Amino acid sequence: MMRVRFIEMLKRRVAAARYGERRARTMLASIKGFWKVCRYGDLYMVLAALAAQSINISVGFCQGFSAVLLPQYTHEFPSISYDEISWIASLGVISNPIGALLGGMMVDAVGRRLLLQSIVLPNLIGWLVIAFSETYVFLCVGRFITGFTIGMSTVSYIYVVEITTPEKRGVLSALGPGLVSTGIFIVYSLGAFIHWRRVAAICAAFSLLTPFLMYFVPESPLWLASKGQMKEAYNAMFWLRQNNNTAQQELMEFTKDRKSDELMTFRQKLGLFKRRSVLKPFCLLIVFFAFQEMSGIYVILYYAVDFFKSVGTSVNEFTASIIVGGVRVVMGAVGAALISSFRRKTLGWASGLLLGAAMLGAAVCDSLDGPPLVKLACVLLHVCFSMVGFLQLPWIMSGELYPQDIRGVMSGATSCCAYVLIFLNIKTYPQLENLLTSNGTLYLFAICALLGAAYCYLFLPETKGKTLAEIMRQFDEEKKEADPEAGAGVHAGAAPARRHSAGAAVSLDRARAR
């Protein structure tokens, strides 16, 4: 009997040692992967992605500002109505669709880099109007102008998708929502200690960061190549890859596929929008955005202080909002790490399921008059789980799922619809809370999140580790359908293909022959 127990104990120790060894190998592989990202060639690509994604810090300022403005403003002007309060919050959203549409139309005309630099104009003007506003009307005008920044900022996802390799695309795209959370945390923290006018002035000064950083990075080489600027495209690609052969191969394949598009008539170009590879991802993303908005993510974001006051937690409302901002920053980094390790579909349904369960827990606790700290914990868990998939995935995929020839327009159109949904959600929340009570809204958010999890499990397409051409083929009815990035494939007699961020499978032997 003692011998059997001794053998079982040895087996358990061996199993534990093997598990520890596997964990160590996994950690070592992660460290090596991080080092590969930071090696000389990839480092330039990472720096360019960070420069473009820095605009999302200003987006976080715009989104989080109403949460610190409204409590201070209502204290200064107690006679302000619920409807006027909702307009202050929602006017920062209502101009988002206009900005997204303008950005979508301009991004293919002026380029990704120039558009990212030009966003400073509405951003700076809007914050200065808010900082120096003396009346309610001017405050609303300032909020409306800063809303253009949020709408136009989606071009950062397009830029990142086009300059990165398939292996790095996910984690570098996920930096966007993480930096939005960073901006929200900063503005929450500032609003807890200083007046909202000074917060607006600080946000105005910070808006100069992105155009300064974008001055040092190149334009998207794919956009330059699509405009026939091949020398500039090569220089941009070489700057990003730091490898002559890689830069030439990617551009060669891309320009080969662009030739047929240059001779298309207007009717043929209009028909590009009717393709299955355009309509299907558009419908999938809009439904995903609808579940995202109705899960309560943006309500907690825009009404953070008032939300915690209505739910009833024992923690100071401003302190709770700062905690939420900090949690979003940390979980944004976690989400960026997870998105490079797990499939998009898995992250989508798991995130929706967990945040729905967390909100359901908050609703049940509120119904039973449970401890306030439990409700706060459930809301914080809701924020945590939203940051690992449900929040960032539709924004990232709006830059991944569309063909190169109309990516800018369709990404802008998708963002436009998403911001309309956000506006309706933010504008109607005070009325919805009066109708259903705060407890009823918690149940509604939980149900919508759980339905969204089921939707992700059943319908969300997978894009992890795939080139842009492979993603396009998921939606094409015929594999031979012409597409600016599909090119290619493996031709007869060609050597094994190498995958590139331009979405092309390039024969190395053919490239050497040229």
Image: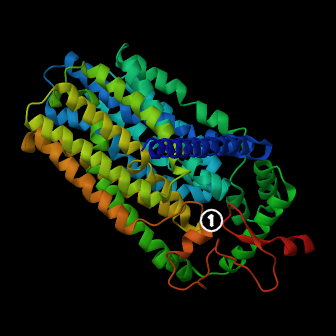
Where is the N terminus found, in terms of image quarters?
top left
Secondary structure beneath disc 1?
loop
**Which residue is nearer to you in this view: 220 or 475?**
475
Where on the picture, by quarter, is residue 432? top left
Q: Is 503 positioned to the left or the right of 255 in the image?
A: left
Q: Is 218 positioned to the left or the right of 243 in the image?
A: left
- Most distant residue in the right direction: 513
Q: Is 39 positioned to the left or the right of 480 in the image?
A: right
Please report the residue visible at 12 percent of the width from the left and 30 percent of the height from the top.
370
> Type of residue at label 1?
Thr
Please report the residue visible at 51 percent of the width from the left and 74 percent of the height from the top.
474
Residue 68: x and y in percent read 32, 24
Please report the residue visible at 63 percent of the width from the left and 47 percent of the height from the top.
114
**Which residue is nearer to you in this view: 148 or 336?**
336
Tell me the crowding category of disc 1: few under 14, some 14 to 19, or many 20 or more residues within 10 angstroms, Cα based: many
Please report the residue visible at 25 percent of the width from the left and 59 percent of the height from the top.
451
Where on the picture, by quarter, is residue 282? bottom left
Residue 505: x and y in percent read 72, 71
Q: Is 511 positioned to the left or the right of 84 in the image?
A: right
**Which residue is nearer to you in this view: 248 or 89?**
248
- Most distant residue in the top direction: 193
Is 503 located above or below residue 343 in the figure? below
Q: Which residue is mark 1?
A: 467
Where is the C terminus found, in terms of image quarters?
bottom right
Whether residue 159 is visible to the viewer of this picture, yes or no, is no
Where on the picture, by quarter, is residue 298? top left
